[in-house]
Amino acid sequence: MKEIKILEDLGRIDSYLTKETGFSRSKIQKMLKEKYIMVNDKCIKSSYSLKPGDVIKIEEYKEPEMNLDPVNMNLDIVYEDDDVIVVNKANGVVVHPAVSNKSNTLVNGLLYHSNSLSDINGEFRPGIVHRIDAYTTGLLMVAKNNEAHASLAKQLEEKTTTRKYVALVWGVINNDTGTIDAPIGRDVNDRKKMSVTSVNSKKAITHFKVLKRYKDATLIELKLETGRTHQIRVHMNYIGHPIVNDPVYGRRKLIDNSGQCLHAQTLGFIHPRTGKYMEFSSELPDCFKHILDMFKDS
């Protein structure tokens, strides 16, 4: 058991312990709810404001056991060698497992496909170097060993990879090109969402250029300079041009349930073994083209 004595006003306990322990806010909130964290030997809410004299007691928290099973999935492998896999992720596929979804993720499919995946990101994210949202389609690089993983992760950190997306957004963008430089963090009113905010945020930069204008929408290409959670979706919503069919940030009624019109089309990186630059591209998926066709006559 860990004990922390509070000497000053520190605001919400979940915010304080997120910084103090390194745990996610959602994990802290779960520990509070399940009485793994007590204040003055009492169960308190995550919104409790810490005051001088408070004593926090934190019991060891064991994550629920989660076994990963290989699942035979129809993976679209764009490229593979002894070090890396480039996979074209389908619409609706979650990248890695969680307690609520243990068997229908990309990781389950990768475990069936290959018996050699990196383990740097832990046993529940084998091979996963970076992610895209469940309802974003497109290219991901997967590491088959730890040396490749370290190299690819470093390239992401140093911003030397190429990641280009295509999106259909609501409204007509008048400028041919643009850069959105706005920090992103958790939405203070809805912890499940991200937003442009100055509170506990990180630098986020997205570049875009217009590919085609329609009456009520614009087809754009986007290039990420940083890789924040939901970055493109949040940034486009921020400038008043949310992604078409985005169920969270889209503002408008969904056209259908086929997923948001956001596709990771181009992926480039330096091969971790050969040192040669490699670049891959993928066509827009049918779910994207189906919605795009609705705007082509406008």
Image (cartoon, rainbow, N blue to C red):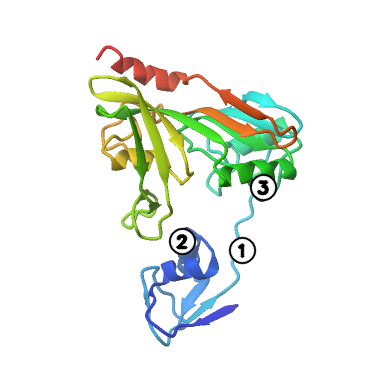
Looking at the rendering, in which quadrant would you find the N terminus?
bottom right
Q: Residues within 10 Å of mark 1 (few under 14, many from 20)?
A: few
State the mark number for residue 62. Answer: 1
Q: Secondary structure at mark 1?
A: loop
For the point 48% across and 36% down, the residue is: 134
**Closest to the observer, 167 or 59:** 167
For the point 46% across and 20% down, the residue is: 284
Q: Which residue is mark 3?
A: 67
Which circle, 3 or 2, is nearer the viewer? 2
The residue type indicated by label 2 comes to Arg
Residue furthest bottom as drawn:
53
State the mark number for residue 25. Answer: 2
Decide if residue 156 is on the left or right side of residue 25: right
Residue 289, relative to residue 203: is it above or below? above
Decide if residue 264 is on the left or right side of residue 217: right
For the point 45% across and 64% down, the residue is: 29
The residue type indicated by label 3 comes to Asn
Residue 131, relative to residue 265: is it above or below? below
Q: Residues within 10 Å of mark 3 (few under 14, many from 20)?
A: few
Q: Secondary structure at mark 3?
A: loop
Mark with earlier residue (3, 2): 2
Image position, residue 69 (x, y; %)? 68, 40
**Closest to the observer, 53 or 142:** 142
